[in-house]
Amino acid sequence: MSQPDAIIRIKNLRLRTFIGIKEEEIANRQDIVINVVVHYPAEKARASEDINDALNYRTLTKNIIRHVESNRFSLLEKLTQDVLDIACGHHWVTRAEVEIDKLYALRYADSVSMTMSWQR
């Protein structure tokens, strides 16, 4: 009998990057918050203690951090798509969703967020 997918949630990953089109945004890093949800069939990992049988969320997170912190983005859409591409990059992933909050993007709001998802 097949089990439902395991779900990995990376919650409130706080990073700083260049995001935006205004002069101030181009010149200064801004705070963003990333949430990632990844589904994968963890059959091997359920019965194992071997990291090679599991989707390594530490590696996934390091790849996201490296990409976000070493690039510049004009649009929240492009940043979100790039992170989604990383999240669904492993061949085991069956579904992924990314939400990125750009903090203080609007005067009277805590943040503006973009959400994108992908499914095999």
Image: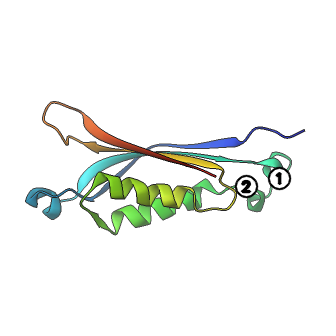
Tell which residue pokes out farthest to the left in this image: 23
- Side of 62 where 17 appears, left or right: left
Q: Residues within 10 Å of mark 2 (few under 14, many from 20)?
A: some
Q: Which residue is mark 1?
A: 44
The answer to which quarter of the image holds residue 9 is top right
Residue at point 48%, 55% (across, down)? 84
Residue at point 54%, 56% (across, down)? 87
User: Residue 10, can we see it?
Assistant: yes
Q: Which residue is mark 2?
A: 54
Of pointers 2 and 1, the one earlier in the residue sequence: 1
Q: Residues within 10 Å of mark 1 (few under 14, many from 20)?
A: few
Element type where label 2 sits in the image: loop
- Side of 1 where 46 appears, left or right: left
Tell which residue pokes out farthest to the front in this image: 120
Tell which residue pokes out farthest to the bottom in this image: 70
Of the residues shown, which amino acid type is indicated by label 1?
Lys
Element type where label 1 sits in the image: helix
Instruction: Pinpoint residue 82: horizontal percent, then vertical percent.
Output: 42, 60
Q: CA distance from mark 2 to mark 1?
A: 7 Å
User: Residue 61, can we see it?
Assistant: no
Q: Which mark is residue 64?
A: none
Tell which residue pokes out farthest to the right in this image: 1
- Side of 83 where 59 appears, left or right: right
Residue at point 12%, 35% (across, down)? 107
Of the residues shown, which amino acid type is indicated by label 2?
Ala
Disc 2 + disc 1, Cβ < 8 Å: yes
Residue at point 32%, 41% (across, down)? 113
Query: Considering depth in this image, is 9 or 112 the residue closer to the camera?
Result: 112
Is 107 located above or below residue 76 in the figure? above
Instruction: Pinpoint residue 99: horizontal percent, then vertical percent.
Output: 42, 43
